[in-house]
Image: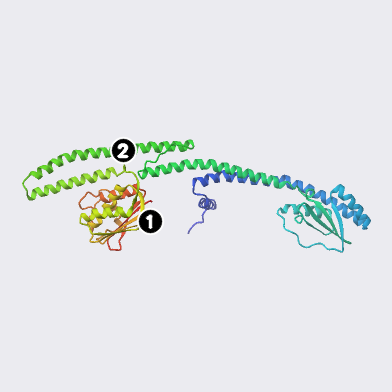
C-alpha cells in the first residue's frame, strides 16, 4: 500500500520544480521576493490603518451633511426652502443640491477600480439616511454623484471627490512602485556582475577541458575569487603533470629508439632468413607501440584551433587511407566548417577510418552539419561489427576485443581511445552504433 506523501515535502518539491534553475534567477528571486512582500505588506497596512480610516471619517462627514440636507428639505419641501438649502450648502459644505421632480433612481452603476471607496460611502449613507439612495463615484473625474429618493422626485447632490475620500492615495502607491522598480534595477545590476564572474570561471574551465588556454583573471565576490584561484592552481598542476608525463614518455621513447635502431641496423646487415624477417617484424611492432604510447600521452594539446573545411580534411584523410590499401567513399556537405585542431582531428579520423577499413570491404564516410550545430562525421562499414553492450569497452585504453572484431590488431589498443580523447578535447564526442551497411558506425561530433 502506497502511503500518501507528506504535504510539506510535496509542496517543497513543487516549489523546487517551478523555481528558477539558474543562479541569476535564484539570486534575483531571493532579493526581489522579500522586497515585493514588504511592499505589499506596507501597502496593505497603509490602506487598512490609514487610508480606510481617513476615508471613513470623510464619508461620515459627507453623509452627515447629506442627511441634514434631506431632513431640512423634508421639513418644508418647497422650492424656496430648497433654494435656501442649496445656497447654504454650496459655500459652507461644497455640495451642489438640485431637485429632479418625478425622477426615479438609476439602476446601474459604473465599475470602480477601488471598491473600498464605494463600500465606505454606502455604509455611511445607510447609517445616516433612511430613504433609498444611489451614487456613482466613477462618472465624473472630480465629483461624486449622489441621489436621494424623496416624495417629490430625486434629490441630486454633487460632492467633490476630495470631500468623500482621500484622493492622494495613488501617489503613495506610485512611490512604492517606483521604489520597487529602482531597487529591482539595482539588484539586477549587482547580481548580474556576480553571476558574470561565475560564468567566466565556467567558460575558462570548459575551455581548459578542450585544450584552449583562455585568458582568465579572478574577479567578483571573495568566494568566487577563491574558487577562481583554486581553479588556476589546479590548472597549473594539471598542466605541469601533463608536461612532465609527455617529457618522461618522450625521454623513454628516445632511450628505447636508440637500442631499437641498433637492432634494426644489425638485422639489416645480417644474412636474410626467416628468423631475421620475424625479428624485423618484432622491431617494427615495437616502434609502432612506442609511437602509440607517445601519441596517447601527448594528446595533441599544443596545436591551436583553426577553422577548417571538413570536406577537404576528409579528402586528405581518405587519400592517406587509400594509399594504405583501404577502399572507401567520401561525401561532405559543401561549405561545412568547424573550429578544430587540424592535425589532431585528422589523426582521430584516420584511426577510425583505418580501423573500419581493416575489418570491412566497404567504408562510407559522410560529413554533415550537426543537429545542435558544428559538424558531424559518420563512418560506416560492412564488417562484422561488435556487440552493442561492448561499445564503451572499445574505447578503453589498451583494450582489445577478442571476439568478432579486434579494434586494434596491430597495436596496443589505443587507436579508439586516442580518437575519442582528441574529439572530447574539442568539446565533442565519438559514439558507436549499428551501421546500415551491417557493420559498425562511428559518429564523430565536433562543435562549430
**Residue 286, placed above or below residue 75:** above
Residue 145 horizontal/vertical position (percent): 80, 56
Q: CA distance from mark 2 to mark 1?
A: 34 Å
- Which residue is label 2 attached to? 241
Residue 339 horizontal/vertical position (percent): 36, 49
Give neighbour class at mark 2: few <14, some 14-19, many 20+ (Cα, 10 Å): few
Q: Is residue 300 visible?
A: yes
Relative horizontal placement of residue 82, taking residue 24 as reference (left or right): right
Relative horizontal placement of residue 89, taking residue 416 as reference (left or right): right
Badge 2 marks a residue whose secondary structure is helix
For marks 2 and 1, the one nearer the N-term is 2
**Residue 35, placed above or below residue 132:** above
Badge 1 marks a residue whose secondary structure is loop
Which one is in front, 375 or 197?
375
User: Which residue: 25% across, 38% down?
Assistant: 248
Relative horizontal placement of residue 309, taking residue 61 as reference (left or right): left
Quadrant housing residue 314: bottom left
- Which residue is label 1 attached to? 370
Which one is in front, 149 or 4?
149
Give neighbour class at mark 1: few <14, some 14-19, many 20+ (Cα, 10 Å): some
**Outermost left residue:** 271
**Residue 167, placed above or below residue 220:** below
Amino acid at each position: 500500500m502506497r502511503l500518501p506523501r507528506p504535504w510539506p515535502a510535496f509542496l517543497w518539491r513543487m516549489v523546487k520544480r517551478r523555481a528558477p534553475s539558474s543562479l541569476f534567477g535564484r539570486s534575483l528571486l531571493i532579493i526581489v521576493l522579500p522586497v515585493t512582500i514588504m511592499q505589499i505588506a506596507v501597502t496593505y497596512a497603509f490602506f487598512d490603518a490609514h487610508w480606510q480610516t481617513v476615508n471613513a471619517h470623510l464619508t461620515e462627514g459627507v453623509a452627515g451633511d447629506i442627511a441634514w440636507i434631506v431632513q431640512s428639505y423634508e421639513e418644508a419641501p418647497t422650492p424656496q426652502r430648497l433654494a435656501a438649502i442649496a445656497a447654504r450648502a454650496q459655500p459652507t459644505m461644497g455640495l451642489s443640491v438640485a431637485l429632479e421632480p418625478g425622477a426615479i433612481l438609476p439602476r446601474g452603476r459604473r465599475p470602480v477600480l477601488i471598491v473600498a471607496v464605494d463600500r465606505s460611502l454606502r455604509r455611511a449613507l445607510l447609517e445616516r439616511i433612511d430613504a433609498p439612495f444611489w451614487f456613482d463615484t466613477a462618472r465624473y473625474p472630480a465629483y461624486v454623484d449622489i441621489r436621494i429618493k424623496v416624495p417629490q422626485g430625486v434629490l441630486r447632490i454633487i460632492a467633490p471627490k476630495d470631500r468623500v475620500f482621500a484622493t492622494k492615495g495613488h501617489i503613495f502607491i506610485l512611490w512604492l512602485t517606483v521604489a520597487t522598480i529602482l531597487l529591482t534595477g539595482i539588484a539586477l545590476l549587482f547580481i548580474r556582475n556576480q553571476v558574470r564572474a561565475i560564468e567566466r570561471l565556467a567558460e575558462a574551465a570548459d575551455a581548459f577541458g578542450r585544450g584552449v588556454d583562455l585568458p582568465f583573471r579572478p574577479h567578483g565576490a571573495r568566494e568566487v575569487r577563491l574558487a577562481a584561484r583554486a581553479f588556476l592552481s589546479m590548472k597549473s598542476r594539471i598542466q605541469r603533470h601533463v608536461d612532465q608525463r609527455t617529457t618522461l614518455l618522450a625521454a623513454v621513447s628516445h632511450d628505447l629508439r636508440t637500442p631499437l635502431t641498433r637492432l634494426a641496423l644489425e638485422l639489416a646487415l645480417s644474412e636474410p632468413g626467416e628468423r631475421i624477417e620475424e625479428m624485423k617484424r618484432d622491431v617494427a611492432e615495437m616502434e609502432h607501440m612506442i609511437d602509440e604510447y607517445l601519441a596517447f600521452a601527448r594528446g595533441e594539446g599544443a596545436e591551436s584551433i583553426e577553422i577548417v573545411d571538413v570536406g577537404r580534411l576528409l579528402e586528405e584523410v581518405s587519400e592517406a587511407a587509400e594509399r594504405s590499401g583501404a577502399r572507401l567513399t567520401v561525401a561532405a556537405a559543401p561549405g561545412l566548417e568547424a573550429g578544430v585542431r587540424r592535425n589532431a582531428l585528422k589523426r582521430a579520423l584516420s584511426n577510425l577510418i583505418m580501423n573500419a577499413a581493416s575489418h570491412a570491404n566497404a567504408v562510407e564516410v559522410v560529413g554533415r552539419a550537426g543537429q545542435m550545430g558544428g559538424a558531424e562525421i559518420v563512418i560506416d562499414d560492412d564488417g562484422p561489427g561488435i556487440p552493442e553492450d561492448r561499445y564503451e569497452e572499445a574505447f578503453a585504453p589498451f583494450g582489445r576485443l577478442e571476439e568478432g572484431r579486434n579494434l586494434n590488431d596491430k597495436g596496443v589498443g589505443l587507436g579508439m581511445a586516442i580518437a575519442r580523447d582528441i574529439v572530447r578535447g574539442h568539446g565533442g564526442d565519438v559514439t558507436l552504433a549499428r551501421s546500415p551497411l551491417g557493420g559498425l558506425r562511428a559518429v564523430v561530433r565536433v562543435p562549430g
